[in-house]
Image (cartoon, rainbow, N blue to C red):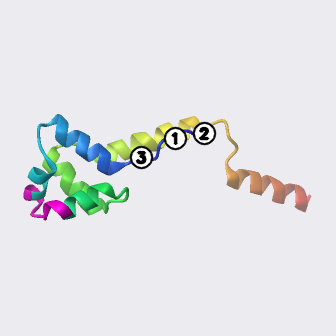
Amino acid sequence: MGKEIFNIGDLIKKSLKAQGHTVSWLAKQMAHDRSNLYKMLKNNHLHPDRIRQISKILKHDFFTDYSTDLQESNNENSNETPYFWTDWNNIYYILR
């Protein structure tokens, strides 16, 4: 479990930098105050509508990044028995 938590704000900032843009530029594109956008990006939980808006502006699908992170996390834990399965096995043995 040493994997870092997926941080959408950091990913957006990296994408901005790679495209040669700044947070101020993105704030203007979104018609937001720069300081409010900095606060939003610092937060690890952006509303899906906000992510969609930023994805369109930057022409980058951040939802795919979420999905990829989820798949990688699931692959890392594939050898573990899912919690719900363990519970159902215990119930089955108790009812036998």
Q: Secondary structure at mark 1?
A: helix
Callout 3: 10 Å neighbours few (<14), some, many (20+)?
some
The question of residue 39 being in magenta is answered with no
Callout 2–callout 1 Cβ contact below 8 Å: yes
Residue 23 x %, y %: 16, 51
The residue identified by callout 2 is 77
**Residue 45, position as x, y percentages in the image:** 37, 59
Quadrant of res 64: top left
**SS under mark 3:** loop
- Mark 3 or 2 closer to N-term? 3
Note whether 37 is above or below 17 in the view shown: below
Image mark for residue 73:
1
Residue 33 can be seen, yes or no? yes
Q: CA distance from mark 3 to mark 1?
A: 10 Å
Mark number displayed over residue 6: 3
Residue nearest the observer in this picture, 37 or 62: 37
Residue in view at x 8 percent, y 56 percent: 29
Nearest the eye: 63 or 38 = 38
Residue range corresponding to the magenta coloring: 28-35
Q: Amino acid at mark 3?
A: Phe
